[in-house]
Image: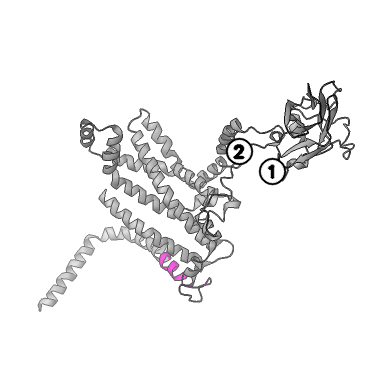
Amino acid sequence: MSASVINVTRRTGAHRSWIRRHAVSLAFLAPAAIWLLFIVVWPTIDTVRLSLFNESATKFLGLTNYKTVFSTDTILTAFRNNVIWVLIFPFFVTTFGLIFAVLTERIRWATAFKALIVMPIVFSTTASALVWATIFDNSPQIGAVNAAALTVSDWFNAPGAYPVSTTAGQTVADLVGSDSRFEKGGNSIISTSSARAGAMIDIGLRDVSPTTLTVLKAQKAVKPQPMSGAITGVVWRAFSPTAPTNTKDILPGELGLPLLRLSLVNAQGATVASTTTTTSGQFKFANVGSGKYFVELVSSNFSAGFTGISWLGGSSLTPVSGLNQTAQALLSVPLADMAMIICYLWIWAGFAMVLIGAGLASLNREVLEAARIDGAKEWQVFRRVTVPMLSPVLAVVFVTMIINVLKVFDIVLNMASGSSVNATPTLAVEIYNDGFTGGVHSGVSSAIAVILFLLVTPAMILNLKRIKGV
């Protein structure tokens, strides 16, 4: 028998022996391998195939779908949003995770603190998105963020007693009624009739909310008596169900407008006195000198104050100036993205804290103590010793979060409002939109999926190498 035949026989026998030794292991692994083939390997191959065909997968198009991806505004916007997520989220979540991990070693109630930070990751992302959508609601009466901003704003810019609802399209000019006109320059209302000392000025306003008058406890409008050396008058809601067109006379049942801030303006336009109306809408300017005067309802009466920031609307941070419209749109950062990143930080900061905390617990404490003995302060120990020693763990967390946000989907789908949907999509959301809504576009959505896979793969390989080195 030749040597080659003997070698083949030996290899065959060794192969059979290896199979016999690992037969049980192979039997247990086979179902998982077959399942993995069907749910991962085959869908990946089929997605690449579909990306080269038309929507019905009947005509080969080559790279046409990929050209469409890079020439469609909404998909380019999705690329921009993914870049925003990648540049902002991994850095901040790693930083917060490091801070929280260090804090848990220095506080007595570390267990409770860890539980509070890790708890959000237990909830589904969809539930968290819906909760934070309420927190960032545009109305200060609903959204906690805008409610806090309203409190601060009212310290410096309190709303007037009769705020004009700009959201409903109302303006100060809509309030102008009898014997008054809208002062465009000052956004106020001023009487059309002049008066001298001892005269009266009556101003009727329309479109005043009856709810406002109820809150202000307005009483029946009553004309005051003329007073020597003073200008008196009344401001009332000039509307009566029995005579809705009569806005010049005070009719029974019509209410005065209380707490209106009034100014007395001379013929030269200078303010010489101020006062406030009573619950029945009456006012009085005493000790008026000679000359003609007008009564002004100052603009602060109609200020709506803080009405809320549209965090989840279509507004964006100011883009770079001097660029064309397309470039500005791509470089602008939607406020909704910032709100969603904050929500995602709340969810994943606990995960980062746990991983970094595990790395922190394994550090050589003798090195840290040696640095302190050498005179290093705590901040120096943290910056020059702790962080460098933790760098492998920090890198793993950072790259893991990059992979995470490249695929971010459910939080965008559930948190973005209708007005910001076109400004905040990510690549994963575009795959869903193009592939499953508004008509199936399997070719384009498959091309986006392939591109996303190519973006994730390098980060995944890098992370696997990092994990081996930790």
Neighbor class of circle 1 (other Cα within 10 Å; few <14, some 14-19, many 20+) is: few
1 or 2: mark nearer the eye = 1
Secondary structure beneath label 2? loop
Q: Which residue, given by chain and number where applicable, does mark 1 sit on?
A: 166
Q: Using the image, determine if residue 149 lies above or below residue 429.
A: above
Residue 135 picture quarter: top right
Q: Using the image, determine if residue 233 lies above or below residue 187.
A: above
Residue 142: image tag: 2
Q: Position of residue 365 (x, y in %)?
A: 23, 35
Q: What segment carries the magenta color?
A: 43-60
Secondary structure beneath label 1? helix
Q: Residue at x 13, y 77 (%)?
A: 4
Q: Using the image, determine if residue 319 lies above or below residue 201.
A: below
Q: Which of the two labelled residues, at mark 1 and mark 2, occupies the earlier sequence position?
A: 2
Indicate whether residue 190 is drawn in magenta: no
Q: Residue at x 61, y 37 (%)?
A: 140
Q: Would residue 146 be found to the left or right of residue 393 on screen?
A: right
Q: Residue at x 45, y 63 (%)?
A: 449
